[in-house]
Image: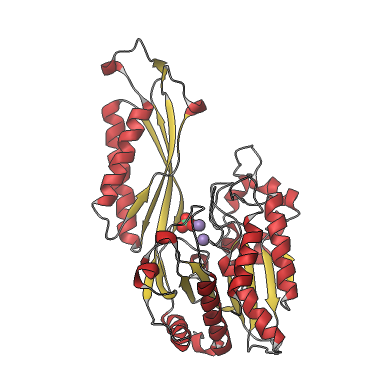
Amino acid sequence: MQFGEEILRQAQLLGAITEEPGRLTRTYLTPQHREAGERIADWMRDAGMSAHFDALGNVVGRYESADAGAPVLLTGSHMDSVVDAGRYDGLFGVLSPIACVKSLHGRGVRLPYAFEVVAFGDEEGVRFGVSMIGSRALAGRFDYAALDRRDASGVSLREAIVAFGGDPQAIGSLARKRIAAYVESHIEQGPVLLNAGLPVGVVTSIAGGSRVRVHVEGLAGHAGTVPMHARRDALAAASEMVLAIERHCAERAETLVGTVGKLAVASGGAINVIPGIVDFTVDLRSGDDATRRQALNDVESCCRAIAERRGVNLAWDPFFELSAAPCDERLQAQWARSVAALGVDVRHLPSGAGHDAMEFAKIAPIAMLFVRCGNGGISHNPQETMTADDADLATRVFLHFLEHFDPRSVAA
Ligand code: GLV
Ligand code: MN
Ligand code: MN
């Protein structure tokens, strides 16, 4: 096996770099981010690339073309994780192309384009509540208002960037002016390839998403004295809203998914106090932007009606939106040729998860390769798995892609 075992070994090493003993949680601009990034940069250099941390803590590796003026093919994925994560989400898309470069460099092969591999510092958005900070900056779409967002300890994104050694003033300079294309390899995070018995698949499009913070304010009171009919219980109201959102999405399950991933009673609540304040989040996704926007309006109306009936106040704050991103047909065809060249049946599938690739869709053709996810396709969970054989095959597909990609084939 050429690449698979080494990639899994590297993923295991990075998986041990965590903020929480016993489980993998690695968030943006932490010492663990730095440690993981330094290892990745070392592996990039060892593979024959230059590597550095940029102004936002992304690690950027570059394998030069023989031609100094050649266009750039960009790839990458994220090195941050969700809380209690698996070890392949994001990192596979960094480790696999580094292995490809090592092979190219070892054989003295230069490409007709400069190849850059980026390990993005933030994609999951765990620490500051906004996602894709790294890729958004490289795509020239950085949201400067996000610099004032604070983490759970009150540290602002701006302060954290400076403490990490980054430079908020230099964010604008990270925007890429001229990239030929952006491609990304990622664990599927679902069961489609597993059920089809296929190690890899070609992504057709990436679902868009909307995120909302919801604040419900009722009236705190004594759990023993306030009659049931007189209560303005914020948690009971929020619970009804959560179920209404679930029902709304379940009725449109072919085209829509919705999740309430966070819900908190103010100050943690107390057993003998009627909850007065509850905050929760909503995450809606669809491959069709019109469907998602309609759903956003519908669930808002539904939550407002529940709030009115229950006599609680509702603040509805949509704070993040990403349009669905179709993958470029020419690049899909190129991935398909590389998959077929390795003797694998070509399967196309959409992505329900968000990926750094989406950020680049407005400035360059994008495309993705998915790799089979074991354990029933579970991800955002420590039970996420990938076999060494699949890591190997997917990396050989990527290498074939790189050795056959012609930037002129996707020139506008
Ligand atoms: C990233 O993993 C996302 O889809 O939220
Ligand atoms: Mn993820
Ligand atoms: Mn990911």
**Residue 130 falls left or right of residue 107:** left
Which one is nearer the viewer's eye here, 397 or 55?
397
Q: Say above or below: 271 vs 349.
A: above
Position of residue 322 measured from the top left corner of the image (x, y, whole percent): 45, 59
Q: Residue at x 58, y 88 (%)?
A: 403
Position of residue 356 measured from the top left corner of the image (x, y, whole percent): 53, 64
Q: Quadrant of residue 51?
A: bottom right
* The furthest residue to the left: 251
Q: Residue at x 29, y 27 (%)?
A: 310
On-image quarter of the N terminus: bottom right
Q: Quadrant of residue 165?
A: bottom right
Q: Residue at x 31, y 48 (%)?
A: 297
**Residue 181 falls left or right of residue 29:** left
Q: Say above or below: 206 vs 346.
A: above
Position of residue 223 measured from the top left corner of the image (x, y, whole percent): 38, 15
Position of residue 83 measured from the top left corner of the image (x, y, whole percent): 54, 47
The reply to whether residue 221 is in sight is yes
The reply to whether residue 184 is in sight is no
Q: Say above or below: 238 vs 49.
A: above
What is the basis of the colouring in this image?
A: secondary structure
Count of numbered tags:
0
* The furthest residue to the top: 225
* The furthest residue to the front: 1
Which one is nearer the viewer's eye here, 42 or 73?
42
Q: Say above or below: 93 vs 379.
A: below
Which one is nearer the viewer's eye here, 26 or 374?
374
